[in-house]
Amino acid sequence: MSNDPRKHVVIVGGGFGGLWTTRALASADVRITLIDRRNHHLFQPLLYQVATAGLSAPDIAAPLRHILRKQANVEVRLGEVVGLDAVARSVTLADGEVIAYDYLLLASGATHAYFGHDEWARHAPGLKTLDDALHIRRRVLTAFERAEASDDEAERAAWLHFAVVGGGPTGVELAGTLAEIAHKTLRREFRRIDPSQAKVRLIEAGPRVLASFPESLSEKARAQLQRLGVEVVTGTPVGAIGRDGYSLGAEFVPARTVLWAAGVAASPLGALLDAPRDRAGRVRVEPDLTVPGYPDIFVAGDLASIQQANGQPVPGVAPGAKQMGSYVARAIRARLDGRTIEPFRYVDYGNLATIGRRAAVVDLRGLKFSGFLAWAFWLAAHVFFLIGFRNRLIVMLNWSWAYFTYQRHARIIFGGAGEDGDGKDDDAG
């Protein structure tokens, strides 16, 4: 037990929600324990750039201890929460340690959802962590190497078929960048294959890609993808995914690289709470982001399920998590002062999605534009919101170099290079 008389705030998750709460409590009369399974904060909107060799892992991540080094009221702990006792007000770590709290924030994010087909995960990796990104990068780069080494035309074609399942922002970004890699980056680097003959297919079960955008921008995104060489398939769900390919309707398509961007599920941490959850496993929180019946437990980010004033759910995007994190900090400060606080209100600043070189779509509160202007806006916004000056500078230099040369400096295959990409990464470059 600590002899510190200050209220103890335990924050689980060092993503946008957890980090924004922590930093907003910098001057509060509390002590904070920030717990995360990983030692870094990750700028997830650029994770696909690591997966497609445009950026290195340290370019979009920063150690939590470094970010919070000047905040004296924070202790960072590397660990995994496996138990929660809401009555005793404590959490239990995987090593058995029990940590008591006065206020608890659960902001542990989301994971992949395969809609009841978890066996697909081995053959169609998703993209949520740096480990995922390095795994996907290895699979993509290895596919071209396997095609180069093969003497069988059918086998070559399977290695050069890239399918991305899911037409949301992540799927669109992955598909567009894969097409650029095949058509531009790898040109003249192979002797037995022509990388530009690679087939990139984006598969969306719904009627259009980027369903959260206005229909006009969805159509523009589709047109821009097609100009980049991506085949866009909508209205048809994938029926099965295996080692050698996938099923689309009644057709089996040979393909050795299938990437998953179709669904997410809330962190399993939500299941530790005796609280209602939605179909994705997100905790249905009160208007002040607390758990029903437990006013000392807050939930934020992708783990929280709450509706906006218009009846639509708050989307699982970085701005939503940041706003929730800042709100939780204000709510805790209000509790300390004996005040009440207004309900959480999400401010939707708009949607951005990049498709490829000089191609993007932007919807800013009804202001819609696409093409080069949208792409430039997307670049500026993402550089601005990166954590740390070094990361901003490095990303700007890398993007400038890639723009003029089409080259991707991070095309290094780490770890095992087996056909199913089962080797483990031994570096984060």
Image (spheres, rainbow, N blue to C red):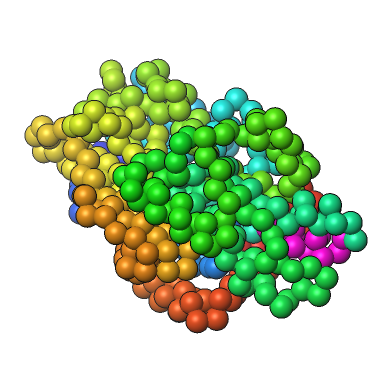
Q: Which range of residues does the magenta coloring cover?
A: 140-150
Q: Quadrant of the C terminus?
A: bottom right
User: Magenta span: helix, strand or loop, mainly?
Assistant: helix
Report whether 163 appears left or right of 295: right
As for residue 147 lying within the magenta part, the answer is yes
In percent of the image, x 39 and y 48: which residue is there?
Answer: 218
In percent of the image, x 66 and y 42: which residue is there?
Answer: 124
Q: Quadrant of residue 238?
A: top right
How far across and down, in percent of the image, does residue 51 sit?
58, 58
Can residue 98 be seen? no
Can residue 142 be seen? yes
79 in relation to 377, above or below: above
88 in relation to 412, above or below: above
How far across and down, in percent of the image, does residue 288 sit?
21, 31
**Seen from this angle, which residue lies furthest right?**
151
How far across and down, in percent of the image, does residue 380 sit?
33, 68
247 in relation to 193, above or below: above
Report whether 145 appears left or right of 196: right
In percent of the image, x 50 and y 30: which residue is there?
Answer: 268
In percent of the image, x 76 and y 44: which residue is there?
Answer: 254
Q: Nearer the viewer, residue 51 or 219?
A: 219
